[in-house]
Amino acid sequence: MTNTSREARDAILQSIQANLAASEGIVHTDHTIVPYRGELLRAGASLSRTEKFRERLESVGGYCYIVKSEDEAARALSAIIGELQSKDAAKRIALSDAPLVSSLARGIAAEEIDVCPLPADLFNYDVGMTMAQAAIAETGTLVLAAERERHRLVSLLPPVHIAIVYSRDIVDTIGDALTQLRGDATGMSRAITFITGPSRTADIELTLTVGVHGPKELHVIVIEAASEAS
Amino acid sequence: MDHLTSETFDANARAALNDAQLRGALKNATSLFGKRRLAAAHSVSNWEDLRSEARRIKDETLLHLDKYLEQFTVNAEEAGAQIHWARDAAEANAIVKEIAQHKQARLVVKSKSMTTEEIHLNSALEAVGVEALETDLGEYIIQLAGETPSHIIAPAIHKTRFQIADLFVEKLGIEPTDDVVMLTATARRVLRQKFAAADIGISGVNFGVAEAGTILILENEGNIRLTTSLPKVHIAVMGIEKVIPRFADLEVFLKLLPRSGTGQHLTSYQSLITGTKRAADGEGPDELHIILLDNGRSKMLAHPTTRQSLACIRCGACLNACPVYQQIGGHAYGSVYPGPIGAVITPQLIGLKKASQLPYASSLCGACREVCPVKIDIPELLLHLRAEITEGSEVRDERSEPVKRKTGERLAFKMWAAVMTRPRLYEFSARVGHLLQGFIKRGNRIGKVGGLIGRLAPPLAAWTGTRDLRPIEAKSFRQQWRSAERS
Amino acid sequence: MMDRDHQSAIGKRQSPIKVGLFVTCLVDQLWSSIGTSTVEVLRRAGCEVEFDERQTCCGQPAFNTGYRREARQVAERFIELCEGSDAEFIVSPSGSCTAMVHHYESLFPDDGAWRARAHAVAGRTFELSSFLVRELQLTDVGARFTGKVTWHDACHGLRELGVRNEPRTLIQHVRDTEFVELENSDACCGFGGTFSVKYPEISAAILEQKIEAIERAGVDAVVSGDASCLMQIGGRLSRIGSKARVMHLAELLASQ
C-alpha cells in the first residue's frame, strides 16, 4: 500500500468511527413499515432435486438432459453436437481439461476438437464443453470452481456451452451451495462462477435478446448414477 | 456534451415532461419492471422475512463498518488482492491512473459500475490517453451517444431502438437496421475484439464478503466475466458500504437483488472472486486491485436516519415504482443516482446546496419504501433532508454549505404556525380568506388564477394552472357544529 | 407504532363509545360535508361524538416542507387537546392527518417526556375506516348509494396505516352501489402537499395517469379517504368537465 493509501485508510476508518460515535446519542423513532399484502407463493408440487433443477434451467432458456450413465451422456452429447452441426454451428469444439469431458467427447467427429485452446483462439470456437462442480436446484444454476477444472474461458467464449454435472452434486439452495463452497477443505476456489441459463440482455427497449457476450445456448447433461435416489 | 445538473432540476423536469418519446419509453419500462418485480417477489414464500433479514445484516455491518472493512482487507490481501483506499473521487482516479500508467495500458474495458460513474473514471482515464470502453450493452450505447445513464439497471432505457440504430450507423458504420438482435450482435462483435486486446479490466462490486475477502459481481450479459477474466489486470472499485460480514449472507441478497431489479430469480452470471489465482499458469488476471471508496459515505453514518442510505444494494426498484421518476426519467435529476434513492444520496454526496431541489421532488407516496428490498425508509430520509435544508444541517463540513434561506416561505410558515396555534385566529383568518376569495371565485369553484393575483400568490397560480380549486365554504364545519349544538 | 391497550370487542359494550372527532383543517373549511358525514356515520355506529373547537391542524404542511419547529408547536397543542379529552378514541376522516399524528414522536428527538405523550396520543388516534372495521368490527353502516364507484388508495392511509381492505369492505356493504377496482388504484394522485404547487407540472403529469384510469373505469364517483387526494383529483375532473365526481368515504357511508 502506498503512503497515500495508508493515509486514506486511516482517515476513512477514523471517519467511520467518528461518525458512528456521533450517531450514538441520537434518538431515532422507528416507523413500522407496513408490509405489502399480496398473494405469496403457494407451495408447488414437490419435485426431486434433479427435476427441480431441470424445471428452473428450462424456465430461463437452458436445455437439460437427464441421463442414467456416462454412456448415455456420450450419446446425448452426440445428439446435441449432431443437431448443432446440421446448422453448421459445431465445427470447432473446445474442451475443458476435465477427464470426463475428453472421454465423452471421444465419440464426436468435428473439424477441430481441442483441450483448453489459447484464449486468443478460443474466440473462434463454436462450442465449449465443461463439467460443473456443483449445481443449484432452486435456481437451475451451475457452479464452476476455477481451480478444480480449467473451464473459466471455455465456458464463456464459444457461443454454445455444454456442461456435464452429476446429480449427486446438485444441492437444493443457494445457501447450500455457498456453505459447500466455503467448507471446501482444499481451499475455496479463487474464482467461482454461477451460471444460470444463457447470456442475455434487455437493454434495448426491454426486448429480451439472448446471447450477448456470453454463450447464446446452454446445454446441461445431468448424469444420475444408478445407485442413488435423487 | 453538457450534462444536466441537479441545480437545474426544475427546468430539467419540465423539459422531460415535454418529451413524449421519453415518457412513452419510461411508461413501458417502469411498468414492465414493476410487474416483473412483483411476480418475482411472489415466487418466494418469505419475501418480507428476506427483506427484514437483509436490512438486519446491513444494519449490523454499518454499525461496525470499520471492523468489517478491516477484516475484508486482511482476507482479500491474504488471497493476493491489493487493497487501496480512496477518500474521494480524485484519489480513486489517481490510483487507477497510476496502475494504468504502470502497466502502460492503452485500452481498458469496463463493466457497468455506478461507482465508477460517480467518480467520473472514464474521463479521468481519457485525460491521460487511456481509452476506457464500456462493455455492458446499455452503457456502451450511451457511451457512444456521449450521454449519462438514465436508470441504475437499464442505462439506455430512454432510447428507442431507432435512436440506437441511428447511433450505430453513425458511429460504427453498419448497414441501417432496427432489428434488436442485429444491433446486439453488432455490439457483441465490436466489443469482443476489445476484450482480447484490453490491458486492464475495471468492474464494480456488488458485495464484498469480509470473512473471505471475496467480491461478488452480478450480470446477465457475460461482459463482467470477460472483463474480469481476460485482461491481465483487474481493478474493482468498491464503495465502502458494499461489505457484508459472512459468505452465507450472500444468499439473502442473491434472492432479493435480481428479483427487485429485473424480476429474475437470478441473473445469468455471478462471479465470486477471491484474490488472485493460486497457480501462475491458471486462468484469470495476474493482479487484482480493489479500491475501497469513501467519497462521502462515512459521513452518512452520523445519523441513524441517514445511515440507512448505505443499505442500498442498487437494485433500481425504487426508480420503477416512483410516480415522479416514471414521468421525468433519470437525466432530470442531474446525478449519477436518480430516482428516490438518488434524491436522498445525491445531496449527501455532492452537498445540500447543489442538490437542494431533489428532496422536494417527491409526493412522499412511499411506493419506494414498499419495494425497497432492504426496507430503506426513503420518505423519512426525504423529510430529514428537507428539515436540514430549511433548518440547517447538524453535520457541518465543507460540503454542507448553508442553503439559501427561502425567506418568503420561512415567513409564511412562521405566520402559519402563529395562526394554527391560536384557534380563534385560525377561524378569523379562514373567514377573511372566504371574503377575499370572492375576487377569484367563479360560481362554486376557483378556476385559473393568473395576472396580478397569480403573481402575488404563486401557489394559487401553480395549482389552478391545471386544476380547479375548492373554495372556502360559507359555513365551515365548526360553524355548523356550533349551530347544531345550540339547537 | 400503536399500543393496543384497548379491547376491540367494543360491540359488546353497554354504554356508547366516546369518540373525539379530529376533523382536519381542510375538511373544516373546504369540505364540511365530510365532517358532518363522519359525525353521522359515527353516531350510526353507536358512538358519542365530541368535537373540541380548539383544534386546528395536524401540522403536516410544515413538517413535510421541513419546518419542524413550526410543526412541533402545532403538534404540542394537538397533544395537549387530546390529553384534555376523555374520549377513548380520536377519529379522523383523513389517513394523512392520522399518519401525521403517528409521526409526532419523531418531532421530539431531544425530549423523552414529549415523546411519550406523543406516543400515547398516537395510540388513541384512528383513521375512520380503520376505526369502524378494526375497532368496532363494523362493516355495514346502513348506507345506500345508487351508482358506480371506484376507490383510490390514498398513499398515507395505505402505506403508513395499512388501510386497504377496510374501505373496500365498507363500500361493498353499501346498498345499490356497484363497485369496480380502479387500475393502479394504489398509484399516487400526485398531490403530495406542497409538492403539488412546487412542482405543478410533475404533479399534473402524475395526476393525468389517475384521471385516465378513472375515465376508463366509467364511474359516477371516485371515492377516497383523504380530502387532499379528492381535491387533487376532483380539481382536474372538474376542469375537464368529467361526468365523474369525487366523494369521500364518509360521504358515501352517510348516504341513505
Image (tube, helix red, strand yellow):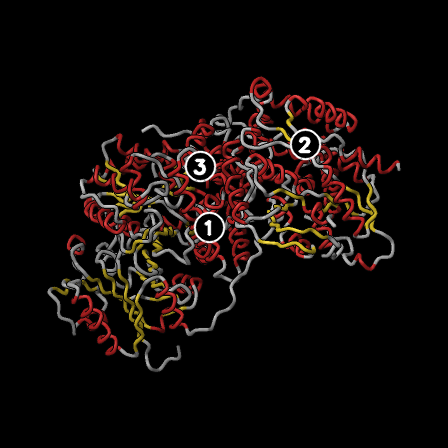
User: Badge 3 local density, few (<14 within 10 Å), some, or many (20+)?
Assistant: many
Task: Name the residue that disc number 2 marks.
Answer: C71
- Residue C233 placement, left or right of B179: right
Q: What distance separates the C-alpha of mark 2 from that of mark 1?
A: 35 Å
On the image, the x and y values in percent for residue A68 come to 30, 79
Task: Name the residue that disc number 1 marks.
Answer: B34
Task: Name the residue that disc number 3 marks.
Answer: B328
Q: Residue furthest left?
A: A111
- The amino acid type, in three-letter code, at marker 1 is Gly
> Vertical placement of A47 versus C95: above or below?
below
- The amino acid type, in three-letter code, at marker 2 is Ala
Tags 3 and 1 on a common chain: yes
Q: Nearer the viewer, mark 2 or mark 1?
A: 1
Q: Residue A86's image quarter? A: bottom left
User: Badge 2 local density, few (<14 within 10 Å), some, or many (20+)?
Assistant: many
- The amino acid type, in three-letter code, at marker 3 is Ile
Q: What distance separates the C-alpha of mark 3 from that of mark 1?
A: 17 Å
Element class at badge 2: helix
User: Badge 1 local density, few (<14 within 10 Å), some, or many (20+)?
Assistant: many
Element class at badge 3: helix
Q: Quadrant of the N terminus of chain A?
A: top left
> Vertical placement of C162 versus B444: above or below?
below
